[in-house]
Image (tube, helix red, strand yellow):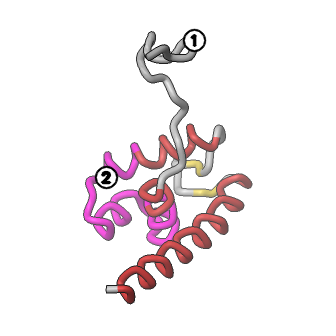
């Protein structure tokens, strides 16, 4: 089997992607006002929440929130927060539909 040029020749260097976990962490951080409180609510460690946020920012290609001296959304962060809530709400609806199928 012949692979297209460049495939299989170098390590995977894909750009980070937006994940549900990243969106959940972002919304939880903004709802709770703190990375550590969000981590506690999600049952994750604070460093894990930080990694999810950093990955989400890299995937979006922009800073979503200023972390010091307190958490403040950027313009892009405000826009993404609205969209993230919509995505998560739809995902919850989807999960409910799947449960109803059982």
The mark closer to the camera, 1 or 2, is: 1
Q: Which residue is mark 2?
A: 46
Residue 5 belongs to the span the image colors magenta? no
* Span highlighted in magenta in the image: 25-51
Quarter of the image holding residue 95?
A: bottom left
Q: Main secondary structure of the magenta part?
A: helix
Q: Nearer the viewer, residue 49 or 32?
A: 49
Residue 35 belongs to the span the image colors magenta? yes
Q: Nearer the viewer, residue 45 or 86?
A: 86
Who's the residue at 40% across and 57% down the image? 35
| Label 1, residues with CA under 10 Å away: few <14, some 14-19, many ≥20 | few
User: Disc 1 to disc 2, how far (Cα)?
Assistant: 41 Å
Could you say where residue 70 lies in the image, as x and y percent from the top left? 52, 56
- Mark 1 or mark 2: whose residue is earlier in sequence: 1
Q: Quadrant of the C terminus?
A: bottom left
Who's the residue at 56% across and 16% down the image? 4
Q: Nearer the viewer, residue 23 or 36?
A: 23
Could you say where residue 22 lies in the image, as x and y percent from the top left? 46, 54
């Amino acid at each position: 089997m012949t692979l297209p040029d460049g495939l299989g020749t170098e390590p995977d260097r894909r750009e980070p992607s937006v994940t549900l976990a990243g969106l959940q962490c972002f919304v939880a951080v903004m709802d709770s006002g703190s990375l550590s409180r969000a981590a506690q609510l999600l049952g994750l460690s604070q460093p894990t929440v930080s990694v999810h946020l950093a990955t989400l920012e890299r995937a979006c290609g922009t800073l979503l929130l200023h972390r010091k001296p307190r958490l403040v959304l950027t313009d892009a962060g405000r826009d993404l927060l609205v969209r993230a809530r919509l995505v998560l709400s739809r995902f919850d609806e989807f999960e409910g539909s799947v449960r109803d199928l059982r």
